[in-house]
Amino acid sequence: MRKRSLISAAATLTALGGATLAYASLIERNMFTLRRFDVPVLEPDAEPLRILHLTDLHMMPDQRRKQEWVASLGGADPDLVVVTGDNMADAGAVPGVLRALDPLLSVPGAFVFGSNDYRGPVWKSPLGYLMPDREYVQGVDLPTEDLRAALVDAGWADLNNARTTIKAGGRSIELAGVDDPHIERDDYPSVAGPISAGADLHLGVTHTPASWVLDAMAADGFALLLAGHTHGGQVCVPGFGALTTNCDLPTSMAKGLHRWPGSDAWLHVSAGLGTHPTAPIRFACRPEASLLTLIPR
């Protein structure tokens, strides 16, 4: 009788695990959602300004549903688009990325790259993300410069270890960004310095929310810091949250809007829209883009 009960329990757990995996891989990872946040960083009496934050598309050429959903975000009427990297997951992904972004390219924009804009994915155990000192393995070269050229030709600012000021929403916006800290391409000292008093708004941009980059940006006075990379944990425990951020960011800040500790800066980390192709699942962490409405302090 006991043996029969154990077999029944094992069968139930197996069925539940299979159902959960099917939900995570077939349903939730395609449940794209637009998050909305109000961020109090503007001067008193300033008109609101809308920033569309996109990240971690990890685009494959045949992901038409994702491409069409991202393209539909033009209807959110953003004043500025900021893309924080990991756009590609395949050497043939550039046309799909541009198809997704095409309706947004007429809007002022800026971007940084992530590791998966340089090298393609390779198979890895998902459990490796829980290991703090895991070896980072890179795949084939991706057409980085093709994507960069297309975005720059559209008028978007390349913020990979760069600093610039652009006009958007009738405001002067100073931006400073770094290339991906996850693969040690960041060089914030080359663009560091106090914020410009002449700009209406100051944004810091990075793919990986590495503490040493965020600390430096906040110390220079940047009011809002934007990042991706974490996937929000990708597989989360309901009622607990993310198990890992794949960097030194606390899991409590794996996604969403937070005050950056020890500063007046706000940090927004987007859980992003894609997954690594060898781990195409999301659980308790829907794929997302964010519309940040900046309002007076």
Image (cartoon, rainbow, N blue to C red):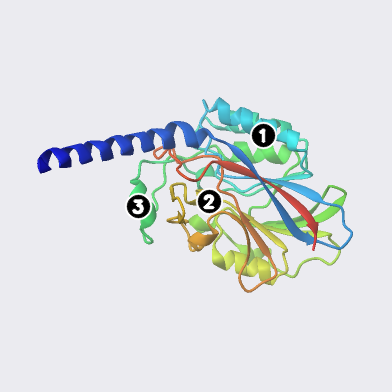
Between discs 3 and 2, the one toward the N terminus: 3
User: Residue placed farthest to the bottom in the image?
Assistant: 262
The dot on residue 148 is: none
First in sequence: mark 1 vs mark 2: 1
Which label is found at residue 101? 1
Tell which residue pokes out farthest to the front in this image.
1
- Looking at the image, can residue 90 be seen? no
> Which residue is rendered at x = 51% and y = 38% of the image?
142
Disc assigned to residue 128: 3
Q: Quadrant of the C terminus?
A: bottom right
Left or right: where does residue 61 sit relative to residue 173?
Answer: left
Residue 229 bears which disc, if any? 2
Residue 276 in the image: above or below residue 228: above
| C-alpha gap between disc 1 and disc 3 | 32 Å
What SS does tag 1 mark?
Answer: helix
Q: Given the image, on which type of amino acid does mark 1 rest?
A: Leu
* Residue at 69% over, 35% down: 73
Q: Is residue 286 left or right of residue 196?
A: left
Picture coordinates of residue 2, whole percent (x, y): 11, 43
